[in-house]
Amino acid sequence: MKCPYCDFLESKVVDSRATEEGSSIRRRRECIKCQRRFTTYERLHDVPLMVIKKDGRREVFSRDKIIRGVLKASEKRPISYEVVENLSRDIEKELRNKMDAEIPSQMIGEMIMTHLRQIDEVAYVRFASVYRQFKDIGRFIEELEKLRGEDH
């Protein structure tokens, strides 16, 4: 680490501790040459997740979009905001664990449906109807029958 006072490239770590929120490590360093002390912070570098849309466009992943979509699907259902928050956090964690910087939007939609199905079937069907763009009542009934068949 380069000293901010004399530009010497070597320093020693005198003290290390996690910050209050735990998102970084604070290090007190001492320059080998001038013996002055300075503080550095070490953080995990987050690579932004990119979502590949159906039409090929790319946009930065947004957990807020998942939350908004699930809240809309679960309107007037007994699903707390905390459950929706956890669902979105779990999906983001799963996506980051895949180690891919670019994720197809279809994968995210399927993941949301998998999670929603375990939480609330009505919210699941509502989300699926928008996500899968049901064109008619027949496709909607087909999805309900599939859901019913897997429950028995």
Image (cartoon, rainbow, N blue to C red):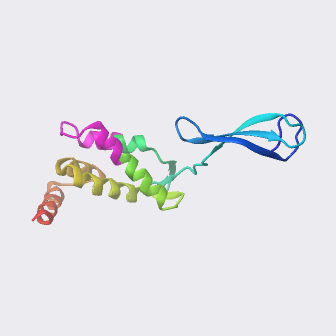
**Is residue 55 in view?**
no
On the image, the x and y values in percent for residue 97 come to: 47, 59
Furthest residue in direction left, as rendered: 152
Which residue is pictured at 20% across the width and 52% down the height?
A: 125
* Residue closest to the eye, 75 or 36: 36
On the image, the x and y values in percent for residue 60 come to: 51, 47
2 relative position to 118: left or right: right
On the image, the x and y values in percent for residue 51 come to: 48, 53
- Quadrant of residue 11 in the image? top right
* Extent of the magenta region: 68-87
Q: Quadrant of the C terminus?
A: bottom left
- Quadrant of residue 72 in the image? top left
Confirm whether the magenta stretch covers residue 115: no
Dominant secondary structure, magenta: helix
* Residue closest to the eye, 37 or 8: 37
Confirm whether the magenta stretch covers residue 70: yes
Q: How many marks overall? A: 0
Instruction: Please determine whether, in this image, residue 41 is positioned above or below residue 52.
Output: above
